[in-house]
Amino acid sequence: MLFKDTYFIRVFDSAAPDVCGLGEVALFRGLSADDTPDFETALARACQSPDGVLPPMSAIRFGFETALADLAAGGARCFWPSQWGEGRYGIPTNGLVWMGDKPTMLARIEEKLEQGFGVLKLKIGGIDFDDEVDIISSVRRRFSRDVLEIRLDANGSFTCDNALERLDRLSRFGIHSLEQPIMAGQPEAMGRICRQSPVPVALDEELIGCRDRSDMDALLSEIRPAYIILKPSLCGGFAAADDWIDAATRLGVGWWATSALESNIGLNAIARWVALKNPAMPQGLGTGALYHNNIFSPLQMKGDRLYYSPSLRWTLPDLQWRQ
C-alpha cells in the first residue's frame, strides 16, 4: 500500500460561514464495510442533508461526529477538552511493526526499541510462521515480559485448524494478546479459540459492520474475547465505539483504541476521544507517522507517547471544496 485516499468535510452555520468544523471521512478501501460503489453518493447526500440524517456508514459518521464537535468548539480542532489536549501528558502508544521479510521486521523492531517503546505490536501472517516465531523469540531473549510487552496481530491469517497450535507455540514468549487469529465472520470457531487459547485473544475486524447494540452484546457474549480493538472510523463512529465499550465493560472484556491510517485530522479526533476515557492501557495511535505528506499539526510522537502541543499550529492544505 503506497497511498490512501481520504475525504474531508467541513460543516458551518450559514449565519457565520467563516467558522467551520473539519472532519475526516476515513474510508479504508478493502477493509471497511463502507467500501461500496455508492459510497461517494451516500457521502454527497449526507453533506446536503437538511435534517442531519446520516447513513449507517462508519467513516461518514466518524467524519461528521468530528466536524460537528469541532464546529461546536469554535473550529480550531480543539474539541473535547482534556488535560491531554492542553499538552499536560502524552498518551502511551504501542510501537507498530508492520509485516515484512525477516531482516526488515528485525530492523523495524530495533528502530522502535531505540525510540523507547515499552510495548511492541507485531503484525504477523505475512511471512513464514517459523520465521515469525524466530523474530519473537529473539526479541524475548533480550527483553523479559516485565520490561517489554509484546502484542501480536494475525489479521485473520491463521486457520481454524492451526490457530490453537500456533497460539500454543507463541504462548512460551509471554505474549500480552493476539488480535484476530482467524478471519472474521466465524463466531462459533472464534469463541472456541478464545476459550482454549493460552494467549489472550482480541477482536478487531470482527467488529466491522456490527452496528446494532443488541448485535454487539450478542457477538461479545458468544465469543467472549479478552479484549476488543476499537477503530472508530471502522466500527461505527465514536457513538458506536462508546456502545462497544459499554457492552465490553458489562462482560469484563478489556479494550483499547487504534487508528486506521487516518490523517492527522482523524488521528487528532481519536486521541481526543481516547483522552476522555483515561485508559490504563497503551493505545495504538502512531500510524500518522507513516505518511510523507500528512497535514502538519500539533500532534507529536515523543518516545512512546502521543502529545498535543498547543503552541504549534495546524497547517491545512488548500483544498478545492465540492459544493
Image (cartoon, rainbow, N blue to C red):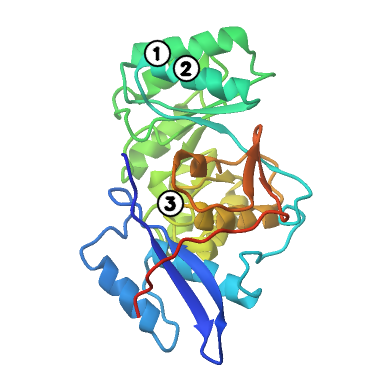
Q: Is residue 99 above or below residue 314?
A: above
Mark 1–mark 2 contact, CB under 8 Å? yes
| Closer to us: 219 or 47 | 47
Looking at the rendered structure, the kind of residue marked 1 is Pro
Question: Which comes sooner in the sequence, label 2 or label 3?
Answer: 2
Instruction: Examine the image and state in which quarter residue 15 appears.
Output: bottom right
Residue 71 picture location, percent across and down: 59, 76
Q: Is residue 249 left or right of residue 159?
A: right
The Cα atoms of the two marked residues, 1 and 2, are separated by: 6 Å
Q: Which corner quadrant holds the N terminus?
A: top left
Between the residue at mark 2 and the residue at mark 3, the CA separation in whole angstroms equals 38 Å
Residue 75 visible from this viewpoint: yes
x 37%, y 77%: residue: 46
Residue at 72% across, 50% down: 278
Could you tell me how far apart the alpha carbons at marks 1 and 3 are, in whole angstroms?
Answer: 39 Å
**x, y percentage for residue 319?**
41, 66
Amino acid at pointer 2 = Ala
Question: Cβ–Cβ below 8 Å for labels 2 and 3?
Answer: no
Q: Amino acid at mark 3?
A: Leu
Kindly identify the residue that appears in the image at 44 percent across and 42 percent down. Answer: 292
Provide the residue designation for mark 1.
Answer: 103
- Assign a secondary structure to mark 2: helix
Per the image, label 3 sits on a secondary structure element best described as: helix
Q: Position of residue 143 (x, y in %)?
A: 63, 13
Residue in view at x 26 percent, y 73 percent: 41
Tell me the residue that label 2 is attached to: 107
Q: Which residue is mark 3?
A: 219
